[in-house]
Amino acid sequence: MTSLSPHLKQATPVTVDHALGSSVYDVEGRRYLDFTAGIGVVSTGHCHPRVVAAAQQQVGSLIHGQYTTVKHRPLGELTERLSHVLPEHLDSLFFANSGSEAVEAALRLTRQATGRPNVVVFHGGFHGRTVATASMTTSGTRFSAGFSPLMPGVHVSPFPSAYRYGWTESEATDFALQELDYLFATVTSPDEVAAFVVEPVLGEGGYIPGNARFFAGLRERADRHGILLVIDEIQTGFGRTGQYFGHQHFDVEADVITFAKGIASGFPLSGIAASEQLMSQAWPGSQGGTYGANAVSCAAAVATIDVIADEQLVGNAAQRGAQLLAGATARAVEGIGDVRGLGLMLGNEFTAPDGSPDTARAQRAQQEAARRGLLLLTCGAHMNVVRMIPPLVITAEEIDEGLAIWSDVLEAA
């Protein structure tokens, strides 16, 4: 009898029968409040009626129309909808299926457009699990160990992770920018760097937000040296941070953004957005894929974007995120060294008395939460950060419910 790989370990013991909104129900009918949202994917909540209806209707007319062979109506509608939410200068799109594919497409485009071989990523970033994107990932060695050699040409510079360094945000930002300049002087000439690739908020790296001065420093150096700024919005995009895209908090202009996760409420869809001038520099044949821009996924994405707008979910993410941050901060007990986040991305970092990561307690808290009906995940290099990622439709009452469970969890764990 076949079975799943033994390395596909579920973070919770739940087998889901059905789900709706911010709740999932197991096969015995028990309800769980879902603060994982499929790792930030079900932006409009589970089985939003408008997304369900759009997908059902599309399944009955066209499931797959390979988009370099034929065009289809949902693709055109999605392209039009995105023109209303993307930064105006990002007016050209390429679609794929997964976040890793989107990051690889951005890498390929920037190398081809600049003729330069290298890329600079930032410590704690997560960009995927393929060989190229794992080579660019530094949020944990578990994503890149055991299948070397990795892709060459990747250089790592610090991210302003203030809590990790024990500094103020300003001190951490000074350090990050100084070390980037030192990397240019000692490791790779900026004239050989095609792109910076950076998350607005480190995701797998521990839910650590960037800041405006750091991103302004990246933009200035990119402009000075002819480097392209790629902002990885795969987890932060489509309203999760309380802005439509995470980098908009920092008033910085990206040359390329990558997106996936929340765009289609659970259907696989990803892509990159760039200016038409930049996108035209991709080499012929370098962009394609069998399942990219699947018709059902595109229909679900159109419905998702409409729901986000009509139900004002970006504003809800900002309001409920502030409520969640305030509540989690107030409940932080001894052993939680830092509570941080942006919008509906919140991390609780567990730290031992000597300042070292307390992975065991974080894991106990995450498991205890599941037993009490609250689904959570961990992240960070040491997996000692318990993250909270509820869907954008979360209500004030559900935030309070989750925080009440979290209080009980902290007492028990």
Image: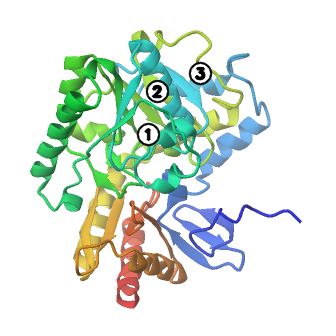
Residue in view at x 63 percent, y 28 percent: 74
- Residue 339 at x, y percent in the picture: 26, 67
- Which one is nearer the viewer's eye here, 186 or 347? 186
Q: Residues within 10 Å of mark 2 (few under 14, many from 20)?
A: many
**Counting residues from the N terminus, which is met first, the one under dot 2 or under dot 3?**
3
**Counting residues from the N terminus, which is met first, the one under dot 3 or under dot 1?**
3
Say which of marks 2 and 3 sits in front.
2
- Which one is nearer the viewer's eye here, 2 or 249? 2
Q: According to the image, label 2 marks what residue?
A: 107
- Helix, strand or loop at label 1? It is loop
Tag 3: residue type? Gly
- Image side of residue 218 versus residue 77, left or right: left
Which image quarter: residue 156? top left
Say which of marks 3 and 1 sits in front.
1
- Residue 191 at x, y percent in the picture: 28, 17
Q: What is the spatial separation of the Cα atoms under label 2 and label 3, in whole angstroms?
A: 25 Å
- Image side of residue 9 versus residue 1, left or right: left
Q: Identify the mark at residue 76; answer none if there is no mark.
A: 3
Say whether residue 312 is visible. no
Residue in view at x 47 percent, y 36 percent: 259
Q: What is the spatial separation of the Cα atoms under label 1 and label 2, in whole angstroms?
A: 10 Å
Tag 1: residue type? Met
In the rendered image, which quarter contains the N terminus? bottom right
Q: According to the image, label 1 marks what residue?
A: 136
Say whether residue 66 is visible. yes
**Counting residues from the N terminus, which is met first, the one under dot 1 or under dot 2?**
2
